[in-house]
Image (spheres, rainbow, N blue to C red):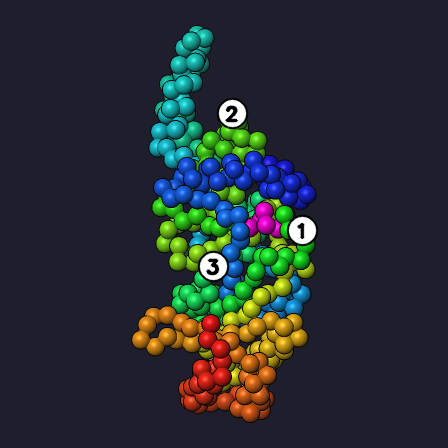
Amino acid sequence: MSNYEYATQHEIIQKDSFKDELIKLINNSTKKIYFKPSKIPMLYKYGSIKPYILDNIENGQISLSLVTSFNDYFDTTIHTEVSDTAGKDETDKMVLMAKNIGIDDMLGGNSNQLAESLQKAYERNQRTTFSSAEYYGIHVCSFSTNPKSTLMWSHYADNNQGICIGYNYKNLLRDERLLKSMLYPVAYIDQPIDATKYLDVQERVCEFPVDVAIFASILSKATCWSYEKEWRFVSVGDDRKSKYIQYNNIIKPSLIILGYHWIKPFFSDYNFNEKTSNIKRLLKISVEEKIPIFMTLPHIGHYSQNLYRIDVNRVLDFIKQQFDNYPTSLEYYTVVHDDLCRMMKDKGEKV
């Protein structure tokens, strides 16, 4: 940000003029209309069943990741105008200026060498700007509006062994205006946003040009990622050394969806006790916090999924009957999993 003070960043992003300029820049860079809905939709967070995620559920926390750990290296990169002749163009200006004041002989015959040197400096500056996200301390928590994405369950929820947590942002626990100002939908575009004039100190395009350029880079991704239907909770200017940061006591989950293969860890000797205790803890948290639990089941005959609400106590009894605290042979998995799925369809409530 142009001012890295934590409080100042929060003040900036809450300004209507900041939001208007941000949306203007994104709209000018895409053929589609980009806007932030006045009403935030139900958002979903895919993940594995790990202790820190369970802590988040239990304590109303949200964890944000440093953007340099993202799987797409174009993600949050800042693009500026590309030119193969910038060095020569700048040298020509210098030569003309020197002639006008009668000192062109001082350049001697080094104009080609100067042009080459300036071109290298220009390209080096482009590369530095492109990968400058880490310098700004950008952390992001990603959500989706789609809890039934086959690709998302495979990529971000431990190959369907994880969970998808639903959040209703009507239920924010604190700082409603600030927290909602940190949430934006992602714009999917075919070409990167050109932030050149926002980073040019000689241009004054708005009240906070650098801040707008950074946020625009955070909120734009290549069209090939559009299936994610992503929203981002964004924080800029935090500890650049921290891979993760947390916002505490923000929002309680409204629901939790279990992946189709969530019970598979019970069939593995690898970290059996740790994995199964995490699952049991998740189910117990859902009972204590009164969070509805659902499970995904395939819609046979279609490439889609259905959701069934489950009776958590019934599932805990099922686990106790089937496993008795030791892993079961993977060959037996199909039988047990089929029993579980049948129980979900027979006893569960389809949603």
Q: Secondary structure at mark 1?
A: loop
Pinpoint residue 266: horizontal percent, then vertical percent.
52, 84
Give the residue displayed 45% in from the left and 88% down from the top: 339
Between 274 and 285, the one nearer to me in the picture: 285
Task: Report how far apart the C-alphas of labels 2 and 3 lie in the structure.
Answer: 40 Å
Disc 3 marks which amino acid? Thr
Using the rendered image of the protein, determine whether residue 113 is visible from the camera's viewpoint: no
Give the residue displayed 48% in from the left and 59% down from the top: 144
Instruction: Residue 154: say if magenta.
Output: no
Mark toward the start of the polypeptide (2 vs 1) = 1
Residue indicated by mark 2? 202
Q: Nearer the viewer, mark 2 or mark 3?
A: 3
Pinpoint residue 78: horizontal percent, then vertical percent.
47, 42
Whether 70 is drawn above or below 314: the answer is above
Q: Which residues are magenta?
A: 178-183
Instruction: Residue 182: say if magenta.
Output: yes
Disc 1 marks which amino acid? Asp
Q: Which mark is residue 175?
A: 1
Give the residue displayed 38% in from the left and 35% down from the top: 82
Pinpoint residue 163: horizontal percent, then vertical percent.
52, 70
Task: Report how far apart the C-alphas of labels 3 and 1 lie in the structure.
Answer: 23 Å
Mark toward the start of the polypeptide (3 vs 1) = 3
Residue indicated by mark 3? 145
Whether 143 is drawn above or below 95: the answer is below
Taken as a whole, is the magenta stretch helix, strand or loop? helix
Label total for image: 3
